[in-house]
Amino acid sequence: MSNHFIREVIVTTQSAEGHAHIAPMGVWEEDGLVTLAPFRPSRTLDNVLARGVAVVNACDDVRVFAGCLTGRHDWPLVAGATAGTVRLHDAVSHQELLLVRVDEDALRPKLRCRVAHAEAHRVFEGFNRARAAVLECAILASRLDRLPAEKIRNELAYLSIAIDKTAGAAEREAWSWLLAKIEAHLVQPDPVRPDPVQTNSVQTDQQQTDSAQAGTAADGVSGSLATDKGPEPA
Ligand SMILES: Cc1cc2nc3c(=O)[nH]c(=O)nc-3n(C[C@H](O)[C@H](O)[C@H](O)COP(=O)(O)O)c2cc1C
């Protein structure tokens, strides 16, 4: 268990050739250095090693998190103040980082960085449950192959409560993207634990069609999940 305060941010980097890359990551501060910990293989890791710089963006638009997990990587970027950096145009604030040290690890090296420049762009509007739920859902969507279908369905049903009660249009759109990805996964046979109730796949197929047709109308999407709890635990 980590006792670090971990911030879920959007890390923006560029390759040696100048191709920008955007990835959600958890970062923390340790011994006065901001730490990034990408799992190998990682374009973020390659880019930071190639250029020695990265940008950590505090981002309150959860579509960026959900988008990166669902193939939507095209978010507006602008050049940072430090050479070789790009940042999210719509970041609430950002920190430009210089790589100071790499703590090597076969699975997940630690990139220890110094803050070279930081800027605030907008005021913090306050917490929102739906945004937190989308973040949790994005984490879920990044771990589908490691989780049993039943756990995924139960977590979605719980998270959908916050979506129903507190989401605006952007949060509903982000939720619908993640839901489409997760539902596509759930119609596959469960690789972790065989799903005994295959009749669910018929229902989920229909839900997927519904959500694709509904676009941003995620009210119905989250509502359908609240009733689709999947098989009872064995
Ligand atoms: C909220 C959130 C936090 C994440 N944190 C990390 C992280 O700390 N390290 C990591 O390797 N991937 C993390 N991921 C998953 C990556 O964003 C995703 O796997 C991405 O493709 C990383 O690989 P890349 O550097 O090649 O883009 C996170 C995803 C989400 C939604």
Image: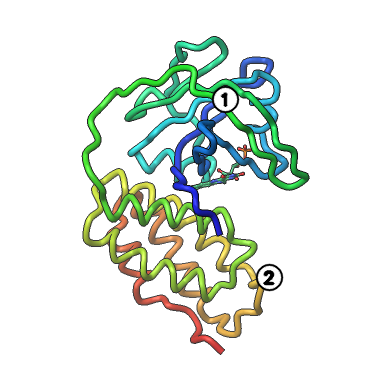
Q: Residue 205, relative to residue 46: is it above or below?
A: below
Q: Earlier in the sequence, mark 1 or mark 2?
A: 1
The image's mark for residue 68 is: none
Q: Secondary structure at mark 1?
A: strand
Residue at numbered disc 2: 191
Residue at x-position 37% and y-position 35%:
59
Q: Would the CB of label 2 be found within 8 Å of ligand 1?
A: no
Left or right of 183 on screen, residue 189: right
| Separation of marks 1 and 2 at Cα, in angstroms | 34 Å
Q: Which residue is mark 1?
A: 13
Closer to us: 129 or 30: 30
Residue 105, by quadrant, is: top right
Could you tell me which residue is drawn at 46 percent across and 41 percent down? 67
In x, y percent, where is residue 66? Answer: 45, 46
Colour pattern? rainbow
Q: Nearer the viewer, mark 1 or mark 2?
A: 1
Please, is residue 166 above or below residue 105 in the view?
below
> Along the line of sight, which residue is nearer the eye, 141 or 3?
3
